[in-house]
Amino acid sequence: MNLLKEIFGVEKPLIGVVHLLPLPGSPRWNYSMEKVVERALRDAEAYEKGGLDGVIIENYGDAPYYPDKVDPATVAAVTYVAAHIAKKIDIPFGVNILRNDAEAALAVAYVTGGRFIRVNVLTEPMATDQGIIQGKAHTILRYRKLLGASQVKIFADIHVKHAYPLMKRPITESAKDTAYRGLADALIVTGRETGSPPSPTKVEKVKKAVPHTPVLVGSGVNENNITQYLQICDGAIIGTSLKIDNKTENPVDFRKVKKLVKKANQIR
């Protein structure tokens, strides 16, 4: 059984993003964890009822993001939300703590029953709007070993959105390093920014470079391109296109979820 089927129970899983409202301590925090949880549960349930195979919880509303370590209130808040989601849905969930606090994401996933984390920068330095962010492979793999959290898998971006690699080299070389030296369990390919799709050629090159590592598309997936991507990769992480009016900060549109799943099932 391959890794993704082991986690999600299906080939080529579709994973919905639960974009959290601003959390305590962030500039747009509105002082209501009740509202944060209410929205998160609504979106997670809409994804599950619409037929998606998993969700990933992300502190999207906390911009501008810390480049590395977030504050304790953020970790506490994401843990609180994840615990509520874990009780409400039956599909697997993961955690991403922006911009690149992989240790915090791993800890949250481990204690709440999450099955995977997303790490924006696992290997090689990236120039981002938060400054230069260094790879986390050497710390996160050791931390996972220390916790005994081998069941929490690491999904790592390569040449992640909203960033540029400081080393000018093909994405295929970065993919090989992330998979074989950074020991990522799965790779994620994105476009240039949130909601922007990567070129199918780019995805295909990455898949050919690491044929035994799962490759997911992590931005810009929608009803119109889902079948094309699923023919060349192993799954997709979807958020913006499934929101009301295609706005990332809006609630999930259940009807859009149903339509996308129906389209994807034509080739799954």
Image (spheres, rainbow, N blue to C red):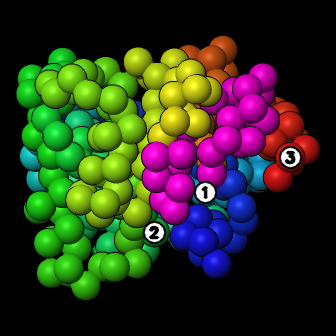
Q: Which of 166 and 156 is in front in this view?
A: 166
What segment carries the magenta color? 208-234
Identify the residue shown where x is 86% and y is 46%. 267
* Residue 222 seen: yes
Identity, as a three-letter code, of the amino acid under mark 1: Gly
Residue 213: image x %, image y %?
A: 48, 59
Do the CB atoms of the residues marked 3 and 2 lie less than 8 Å apart?
A: no
Please name whichever residue, 115 or 3, is drawn nearer the observer in this view of the structure.
Answer: 3
Spatial CA distance of label 1 from label 2 is 10 Å
- Whether residue 33 sits left or right of residue 115 in the image: it is left
Q: Earlier in the sequence, mark 3 or mark 2?
A: 2
Label 2 is placed on what type of residue? Answer: Arg
User: Does label 1 or label 2 sit earlier along the sequence?
Assistant: 1
Q: Residue 115 carries which label?
A: 2
Separation of disc 3 and disc 2 at Cα?
25 Å
Furthest residue toward bottom: 148
* 230 within the magenta span: yes
